[in-house]
Image: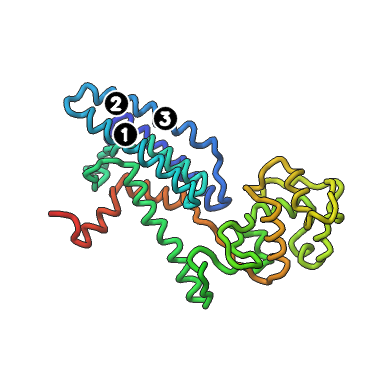
Amino acid sequence: MDASIPDLLRLLVVPALGWAALRDWRTRRVPNDLWGPLVLLGAVLLVWDGYAALGTPYAFQPFAVRVAFSLLFVVPLAYAFWYIGGFGGADARAFMTLAVVFPTYPSYELLGYSLPVVETALGVFSLTILTNTVLFGLAYPLVLGVRNALVGEFSVVMFVGRRVPVPELTDTHGSLLETHDGFTRDGLDLDALRMYLRWRGLDLADLREHPELRDPDTLPDDPNDPTGGAVVTDGSGDPWGAAAFLEDIESSAYGTTPADLREGLDVIVDNEEVWVTPGVPFIIPLFVGLLVALTGGDVLFWVMDALGLVPA
């Protein structure tokens, strides 16, 4: 493969992101320390490319504009998506990382072909990755919706969740979409449920068969390690011992509050099936979007070209 040294070094992101996508699929958790070295790599390569562009007439200005767009538009956009709940924290970090590593289009020669095949007029490669990812990511809720329709499960949440038998929750990733009052986007994280069960030394069947376990006086004197999802009681004001659990462990249980935990446990005990959102493992379409961007280029351009929207 013929390419500049910086562009070849940028390909180190591909196996790293592939590993993150695999982790996202299996556990829905990606270690935060993955991104720092990749951001550092991207920063070094930016300086390298910038220095090279300084020696080429008319090259530095477009390079600087594209880098500025990537860092000052794509990075804040990824943060905004995370802030409104459209992305998870790992998804946002991954996008921000790619905005640093791939601000401009790389160039590769493989078997006589120049890659990427399609380059946008704007020339901001991180934006191409973003648009590719969004287009691939849209397939996920569509697949969920079609699946639910085929089995006769129609609901306002049919495009973001699926019905799961309660006994299967301990082997399911995602979060509840239900409360006793209706649907919610901020239901109990199932990793936090597993942490709670391990902390109490119970399985889900125990919890459902013995309603007296709601009494915080039944909490263990020597609770177990809650793990990552993978006590002294304070009287009847803490149903399920939710507050005692969260006070005792040394992590946040993925943002779970005592009220979230109590509500989720009540729903689980009172129902045979519940709506669960698996959450979009967004790093998977991001990885696919990156691979397609590196080879074919911009999928949105393909779509617009097929619709006759690209000027001849």
Q: Residue pushed farthest bottom?
A: 152
**Mark 2 lies on residue:** 50
Whether pointer 2 and pointer 1 mark residues with C-beta atoms closer than 8 Å, the reply is: yes
Q: Residue at x 57, y 47 (%)?
A: 29
Label 3 sits on a secondary structure element that is helix
Q: Residue at x 36, y 28 (%)?
A: 45
Residue in front for this viewpoint, 23 or 255: 255
Is disc 1 surrounded by few (<14), some (14 to 19) or many (20+) residues within 10 Å? many
**Type of amino acid at the residue the image marks with label 3:** Leu
Nearer the observer: mark 2 or 1; the answer is: 1
Mark 2 and mark 1: Cα distance apart in space: 10 Å
Measure how far apart labels 1 and 3 are at the Cα level: 15 Å
Q: Name the image quarter holding the C terminus.
A: bottom left
- Residue under numbered circle 1: 67
Crowding near the residue tagged with mark 2, few <14, some 14–19, many ≥20 C-alpha atoms within 10 Å: some
Q: Position of residue 57 (x, y in %)?
A: 17, 25
Q: Amino acid at mark 2?
A: Gly
Residue at which label 3 appears: 41
Earlier sequence position, callout 2 versus callout 3: 3
| The image quarter in which residue 138 lies | bottom left
Residue 269 got which mark?
A: none
Position of 111 compared to 214: left or right?
A: left
Secondary structure at badge 2 equals helix
Q: Position of residue 232 (x, y in %)?
A: 84, 46
Which amino acid lies under the numbered mark 1 shown in the image of this protein?
Val
Instruction: Say which element carries label 1.
Output: helix
